[in-house]
Image: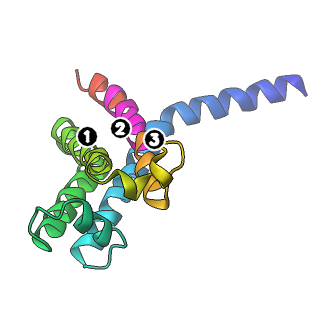
Amino acid sequence: MRRWSRAVDRLLIREMHHWGIPVLRLALGLVFLWFGALKLAGVSPVVKLISQTYSFFPQPAFIKVLGLWEVIIGLGLILRLGLRPTLILLWLQLAGTFIAVALAPSMFYSSGNPLLLTLEGEFVAKNLVLIAASIVIGGYELSRQR
């Protein structure tokens, strides 16, 4: 039984090592493609949030540009095209979500307390995971290109 367990562990580890980064890259790409497509179609649930925090940009053109930007990120990740510029676009886009918190903190924190996130605050906080995933993808994929 123990030998079988070690064999299964080796198989799982080998397969997870082989498929982990590609699956992570595809999943992250799909999220960006999906979110961007929703913005381009004019049905994204975050349009109101974006319009309120970035009211100084012309609407709805800003939403369309952001949607196109996210579609480009998604396609770059999915197709492994221009990974360096794709990751830079991703990090700039995600930086923009954190700038929104600085522009309108009351939308993201309950009672001004940064530990008490609103729904919008949780939406932005999850971007920490997207940033971490992009760093893992970039470190792995770009080191393979050397």
Is 85 in front, or is 141?
85
Dot label at residue 55: none
Please report contact status of discs 3 and 1: CB closer than 8 Å, yes or no. no
Q: Which range of residues does the magenta coloring cover?
A: 129-139
How many numbered tags mark residues here?
3
Residue 141 at x, y percent in the picture: 32, 31
Q: Amino acid at mark 1?
A: Trp
Measured from the top left, where is residue 58 in percent x and y? 8, 68
Name which of mark 3 and mark 2 comes first in the sequence.
Answer: 3
Residue 140 occupies which quadrant of the picture? top left
Q: Quadrant of residue 63?
A: bottom left
Residue highlighted by disc 2:
134
Name the mark nearer the viewer: 2 or 1: 1
- The residue at the point 11 percent across, 62 percent down is 56
> Which of disc 1 and disc 3 is earlier in sequence?
1
Disc 3 to disc 1, C-alpha distance? 12 Å
Dot placed on the residue nearer the N-terminal end, 2 or 1 = 1
Q: Residue farthest to the right?
A: 1
Mark 3 is on which residue type? Val
Residue at which label 3 appears? 129
Mark 3, secondary structure of its residue: helix
Instruction: Answer whether labels 2 and 1 touch (C-beta < 8 Å).
Output: yes
Q: Which mark is residue 91?
A: 1
Q: Where, quadrant-wise, is the C terminus in this rendering?
A: top left
* Left or right of 62, for residue 121: right
Q: Secondary structure at mark 2?
A: helix
**Residue that extends furthest to the front in the rendered view of this protein:** 111
Say which element carries label 1: helix
Asked if residue 35 lies left or right of residue 3, the reply is left
